[in-house]
Image: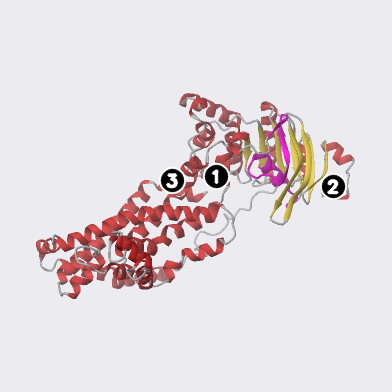
Amino acid sequence: MTDTLTISSRPRAFRPATTEPTMVKWALIAFCLAVLTVLLFAPLFAVFDEALRRGWAFAVASLSEPDAQAAIRLTLLVAAITVPLNAVFGIAAAWAITKFDWRGKAWVITLIDLPFSVSPVVAGLLFVLMFGANSALGAWLVANGFPVVFAVPGIVLATLFITFPFVARELIPVMLEQGRAEEEAALTLGASGWRTFLTVTLPNIRWALLYGVLLCNARAMGEFGAVAVVSGKIRGQTTTMPLMIEMFYNEYLSVAAFTMAGLLALLAFVTLTLKTALEWRYADQLAATYRH
Amino acid sequence: MNIEIEEISKDFGTTAALHPVSLSIPSGTLVALLGPSGSGKTTLLRILGGLEFPTAGRVLFDGADATNLSVQDRRAGFVFQSYALFRHMTVFDNIAYGLRARPRKSRPQTAEIARRVTKLLELIKLPDIGARYPSQLSGGQRQRVALARALAIEPRMMLLDEPFGALDAKVRRELRQGLRDIHDTTGLTSIFVTHDQEEAMELADLVVVMSMGRIEQVGKPEDIRARPKTEFVREFISA
């Protein structure tokens, strides 16, 4: 057998074909930093600056107002309901799409993207049309003491719809790339379907799942359009944090508006920090999962 | 364990992957399913392993009908083409997987599992790699770990799908002997799929030449070489 070709005779001073000259490198880095500063850092700084314009005490006081408190609680409640549900739905959809062959699969993949392509306002109107008092179903629900539109269930439904694609879209490419062989191996070794899912499938997709859940959570807490339509924006009852921010802003309560906005941004920071911490903690396993 | 395949056929939609095929495999034989891609050899192997179910026909293990036996209950040691090692588990956990998946009453104690895994690592001549992850192994090491993992469940037979397919020619030849040794040590009926006629002829006791979903010839390597039954077999083994 011939030996593998050695390329060690190449002079060291040559730079690899994929590396740019130093000047290009620094120019690109500077450009990226400039764009990030203008589009991301500066606005974020402005939000916190405005929130704290009249001091910490004032900002905190604006958040402890009952309406603001209700909005924070509602947003956390909606996220707490929709994120786990969409994690389960997303896994189920990705599983069905990647592990089985069936007719109409291509259609379902397209449908999963629907919430991304439909304007959130249209999605909100859709739910108003279906569950509003003018529809037979909506009238019946109201008569039986379970109003959907202009109430919390409607907000949950709209948020579920809007955030559905996040988990599934993160999982599908990963699961397609990993194929079915490991699951089949587990089955031949005597594991039940459920055990296979818990010990083989889930660990293999956990990072994609985590990203999907984080994105889903960020959107669930931040969704404005669809929720604005179905909620009716009843102060203290169906007003979520993003809706509350708009109300404060329209009432010229800019410190309250920006404090609430800052809090929403902070929640996003917490999830990002969590993600980074987990990545750092499990770096070796992450590498083992993807380097295969 | 002896294996009887009676008039097994398999359709995928409108295309027939296997026309009715019959084959009888005596206990302890090392069998090669030899054929080009699309000949139905992998489909037949997967039917034996319980990963596919035949459209018609029967499979008998030691005379008992196993056609509808679930994949878990077949206790077939299956080695996959690219090994399908669990990438998030260490080599030790990979090999222990089948033992830990057993129902509680037949599951060995932790210490007993460790002892068996250690023994298997010795059998594949890689005693020190238990703590590594599959991504840290060479192709040949992965293949042997896959063998050990399949052997751990105390299988009734070994089924290997292109066990040397992902390896370079040198490692391939080394591991061929390794597989022969393990087969002779365990005495298990073993069936492997290959498209490499040299590999089949050198390694197997019994060679089954397949083409287009049909069995062309069954026989000892020297008989097939001396008396090819069809034009296809003559051409394929001289390639």
Residue at x-position 30% and y-position 59%:
A144
Give the letter of the chain under mark 2.
B
Left or right of A46 on screen, residue A57: left
Secondary structure at numbered mark 3:
helix
Residue A249, located in which quarter of the rendered image?
Answer: bottom left
Q: Does B148 sit above or below residue B51?
A: above
Q: Is residue B11 magenta?
A: no
Q: Does A247 sit above or below residue A56?
A: below
**Within-10-Å neighbours for mark 1: few <14, some 14–19, many 20+:** many
Q: Which residue is mark 3?
A: A285
Q: Give the extent of the magenta segment.
A: B37-65
Measuring from the top left, give residue B185's x and y in whole percent: 67, 26
**Within-10-Å neighbours for mark 2: few <14, some 14–19, many 20+:** many
Comparing labels 2 and 3, the label whose residue is closer to the camera: 2
Residue situated in front as seen by the camera: B81 or B109? B109
Q: Is residue B60 magenta?
A: yes
Q: Which mark is residue B233?
A: 2
Q: CA distance from mark 2 to mark 1?
A: 36 Å
Secondary structure at numbered mark 1:
helix
Give the letter of the chain under mark 1.
A
Measuring from the top left, give residue B155's x and y in whole percent: 62, 31
Give the letter of the chain under mark 3.
A
Residue situated in front as seen by the camera: A290 or A15? A290
